[in-house]
Image (tube, rainbow, N blue to C red):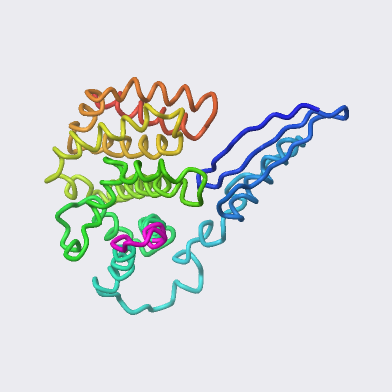
Amino acid sequence: KTEVLAKCRSTDFVKFYIRLYSEQEGILVEVQKVYGDSMSFFRDSRAILDAAEGRAVSKPEEEEPLYLRLPVSQMEFIKDATLPPLTFEEESESVNIAAELLASHRSDSNMLGMESLVTLIDPLKSLRSSAVIAAKRVLCPEDTGHDSFNLHNYVMSLIIYNNGSAEAATLDGTAMENHYAQLRNLAISSVANAIALLLEEETLWESIRSSRTWYGDVLVPALVRDIAMAEECPHEACYASRCLTSLASMSESTLFASKIREAGGMMALKIAHEVGTREYALLAQDAGKCHQTILRCR
């Protein structure tokens, strides 16, 4: 019999192998988890095996939890409920906890802090007011909440300098093999969500205007590099495309669209779209949307 092996990594950083065996009766498909979240692996492996057997793959929205399909604010019982108002300090509490975890010297605390931050910035999973506070902490270097720990500097350093890459090279084959890559992936995800949220709130330009030069000269080229490396890191390229789409969408300034072009963004997006068309539909969608947004900014 003949064996074909594919080494895979999901968006949740679950590593697994797919083996195809050629038998007289047909093709045998085996999916084996190497490490990562078991529930995430179960969803992915079920979809792979269903597709191998020719079954219809269930749509993601059919598996969404109830609170995503029907937010609490839209439920009948909450319409007449009276909730006590929260102070700014109370709304900031969860963001402060995430910052404390990121300030820790423990790698597991850092990972938990980044995962918490990504969740906090999602208004479907946290209070919208808390999500806005977290988004401003991530995007604004001069936010007043940075007294004890500068959340902006930490997150952006993961993106710009890819902290830990040298250490990561010594961890191949260990449980920590993808630790720094996952931290960076979460960092780009948090920035993409933060930019999109403040754009929706119509406060993005106000939040980053004082740092617009840094965003244009430092962050934009780093995101363009991520997009250009779509074949090696398609997940990061997706988030980077979303970041640039939101930055280029601001009506207050065409600065970022110009900076994206100067950094070679149009060619990088073309490469990413080609990779996405061949291998990753979500990447093709995000890269295409970013490309169209920049073209409209002429």
Placement of the N terminus among the 4 image quadrants: top right
Q: Residue at x 25, y 74 (%)?
A: 87
The one nearer the camera, 243 or 10, is: 10
Question: Left or right: where does residue 228 sit relative to residue 247?
Answer: right
Residue 17: x and y in percent read 63, 39
- The quadrant holding residue 295 is top left
Q: Is residue 128 above or below residue 279?
A: below
The one nearer the camera, 60 or 252, is: 60
Q: Is residue 109 above or below residue 293?
A: below
Question: Left or right: where does residue 149 sit relative to residue 118?
Answer: left
Q: Is 107 included in the stretch rendered in magenta?
A: yes
Residue 77: x and y in percent read 50, 74
Q: Residue at x 26, y 38 (%)?
A: 247
Residue 165: x and y in percent read 35, 41
Magenta stretch, main secondary structure class: helix
The one nearer the camera, 160 or 152, is: 160
Q: Residue at x 19, y 50 (%)?
A: 207
Q: Is 159 included in the stretch rendered in magenta?
A: no
Q: Is residue 205 above or below residue 109?
A: above
- The quadrant holding residue 81 is bottom left
- The quadrant holding residue 3 is top right
Which range of residues does the magenta coloring cover?
102-112
